[in-house]
Amino acid sequence: MSIRYETRGPVAVLTMDNPPVNGLGHAVRTGLSEGVERAELDPGIAAIVITGAGKAFSGGADIAEFKSGKQLLEPSLRVVIRALEGSTKPIIAAIHSVAMGGGLELALGCHFRVVAKGTKIALPEVKLGLLPGAGGTQRLPRAIGLEAAANLIASGETVLAETLGKTALFDRVVDGDVLEAALAFAEEVVREKRPLKKLRDVKVEHPNEQGFLQFARNTVTTMSKNFPAPLACLEAVAACTGPFDAGLRKEGELFQKLMATPESRALQHFFFAERAASKIADVPSDTKPRAIQKVAILGAGTMGGGIAMSFANAGIPVTLLEVKPEALDKGLGTIRKNYESSLKKGKLTEEKMAQRLALIQGTLSYDAIAQADLVIEAVFEDLGVKEAVFTQLDQVMKPGAILASNTSTLDVNKIAGFTKRPGDVVGLHFFSPANVMKLLEVVRGAKTSKDVLATVMDLAKKIGKTAVVSGVCDGFIGNRMIERYGIQASFLLEEGALPSQVDRALEQWGMAMGPFRMNDLAGNDIGWAIRKRLYVEHPELVYSKIGDKLCEQGCFGQKTGKGWYLYEPGRRDAIVDPSVDEMVVAYSKELGITRRAISDEEIVERCIFALINEGAKIVEEGIAQRASDIDVVYLSGYGFPIHRGGPMLYADEVGLVNIVAAMRRFARISRGDPKFWEPAPLLAKLAAEGRSFHG
Ligand code: 3HC
Ligand code: NAI
């Protein structure tokens, strides 16, 4: 049963019991309706208390029900709330832990609300590309005022109940057992025959309603590019100063409109995709993780320093090991500078900075790290260096320690083979800057043990990372795909585009950064080194050599002040470099190519469809567990536009059959290996069957 009906003297207690978060699915809505009716009809019942079992009052509507795209089964949440509000017996919400979305709207429909301190309160629908659709945009302003409600609804922000304790949202904010407090409150209400409060009857007033709303619209317009929901939230809230039913109608119309947008589908997809990514099919959820109390990091360079900060920020002590004192001092100095910069920007207090710095110790000796529970290697990307390091780690680390590598290209199975404990070895591929970027690829070696995987997935959450499991292959999920995207970007230059046009087209489409600006940021020499290796290992692969030409001139990007663009000292703005454009045109001539005008649409399709095709291979080979994991990688680590839901969801939106047709066209018109455009078998199969990656 999703609703438990119990009586406590003259009070009926309706407990929502629908784990994990008491989502308001059909069974819960029906149970609530029936429970209220039963209590209404029972002459022995004087009041009703509604509460939630487990870890939430309610996390809101059951988002999984939205997926079907069909009208939800009756009773809708609005109908349930109307029944509560119209009840002749007092209804008291006993709210604890989490009251979000429809859960908060349900409470707003009760006559009284008793809340436990520390309860998280939000109308977060905007984060799903929606607005509160069960009266939240009309009742919340009546409880806390127009301005505060507009801010909460348009931002989706979570606040603690006590911050709203002095508003009409809560009748009582309590410490301790909220159900007992609500029962005591119900007894008072009945004894004193208090009138039933209905938020719908409250009149909203604001001294400068139009001025405030215009200011809010301006702010939201600049912040919510590509997303219609925040403005729609304000439009709905604006209706709260008029008659209640008209406001409710407006809210309903806007809700239905938003529900049909691709932006909302993308955000809902990401919500579930992120949670799915944390699960590994053959690692049971009750696998006991190993305790991680102390972490060691080898190499205090770009990555090692950022990784150390990620752990210190989460309160986990870290020891950083370097080979030379100068390198150690430099690494520790950079960490300090980074924290000082956050302090200057007001993102950190002096006290927090001191605490975090105290958690990071430097060492030159393996003895100092031998007792760590996890060691992450972030030394030079060279298999010989990794071999020396892992051989040593195998000798010194305590039994049961997890040995991780942050390698971005090397074979984790080979690295595991340098030890006598390959089950304890795993890849932890952080992204730069590691203290900022959310993505963490967990690279599962052939022998990585299940409890090691369970441990690192758990740990990723603790340090605020979004972990996605990848099998072992060149580039893992993210970089393997981006390489295909980069190949197309380079051939587009040979055929007629210029770097700034390619970047502009992809940025206008939504990518945070075009491929050439991105390469300048990461360092063109990194890709060059990878290509040089691949020329030897995979001579069959066909690459444009235009990037190599740039690197031969020492144009490595921001770090050299010159790459695909020019950079003024200390600045990151990319300035178009006419000499690079000339080099591009001259290179086409050298190859005997007649340059042609290339449309932005072709640029976007060639680059993005190349990503998608490789993604399909990655799913088919089992490198990624599911297509949505690829979306999580791209949305959390590669600046893929969130309103498009990731490359694989975008593919579904375009239609796989259209993608295959475009790829056939590109095979005819583009330079490079025509085989590049052969659809991955999975893509071809799904397209032929009229199916999609996400079913
Ligand atoms: N519907 C369906 N499933 C939900 C859900 C919801 N509203 N909220 C959470 N879940 C599921 C998650 O998918 C996850 O499932 P899994 O275990 O199978 O992966 C499980 O509950 C636990 O979720 P979390 O891992 O996120 O648990 P936390 O304890 O970290 O957080 C939470 C709990 C704060 C409630 C968080 O899950 C959350 O923010 N949920 C979304 C809340 C939300 O957006 N509500 C609005 C829904 S739309 C709505 O109400 C429309 C209405 O206006 C008409
Ligand atoms: P880096 O050159 O900035 O730092 C490497 C550090 O390792 C140097 O400080 C060096 O002194 C130290 N070192 C070398 N040998 C050592 C040893 N035997 N013991 C201890 N320290 C040693 O390199 P970076 O960029 O930090 O890369 C480190 C690893 O992270 C590489 O495997 C790289 O592929 C990977 N990586 C790099 C990313 C990036 O964007 N830079 C992104 C993701 C992974």
Image (cartoon, helix red, strand yellow):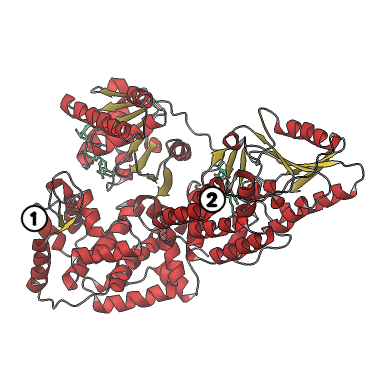
Q: Report if the beta carbon of the residue with label 2 is closer than 8 angstroms to ligand 1.
A: no
Q: Residues within 10 Å of mark 2 (few under 14, many from 20)?
A: many
In this orientation, which residue lies closer to the viewer: 268 or 190?
190
Which label sits in the foreground, 1 or 2?
2
Q: Position of residue 407 (x, y in %)?
A: 29, 43
Assign a secondary structure to mark 1.
helix
Q: Which residue bears the numbered disc 1?
A: 552
Residue extending furthest right?
43
Q: Position of residue 72 (x, y in %)?
A: 67, 63
* Residue 531 seen in the figure: yes
In this orientation, which residue lies closer to the viewer: 131 or 444?
131
- Left or right: 479 as drawn, with respect to 23: left
Assign a secondary structure to mark 2.
helix
Q: Position of residue 416 (x, y in %)?
A: 33, 39
Label 2 amino acid? Ala
Task: Name the image quarter holding residue 180.
Answer: top right
Task: Name the image quarter holding residue 606.
Answer: bottom left
In primary-sequence order, the first of circles 1 and 2 is 2
Q: Position of residue 261 (x, y in %)?
A: 51, 66
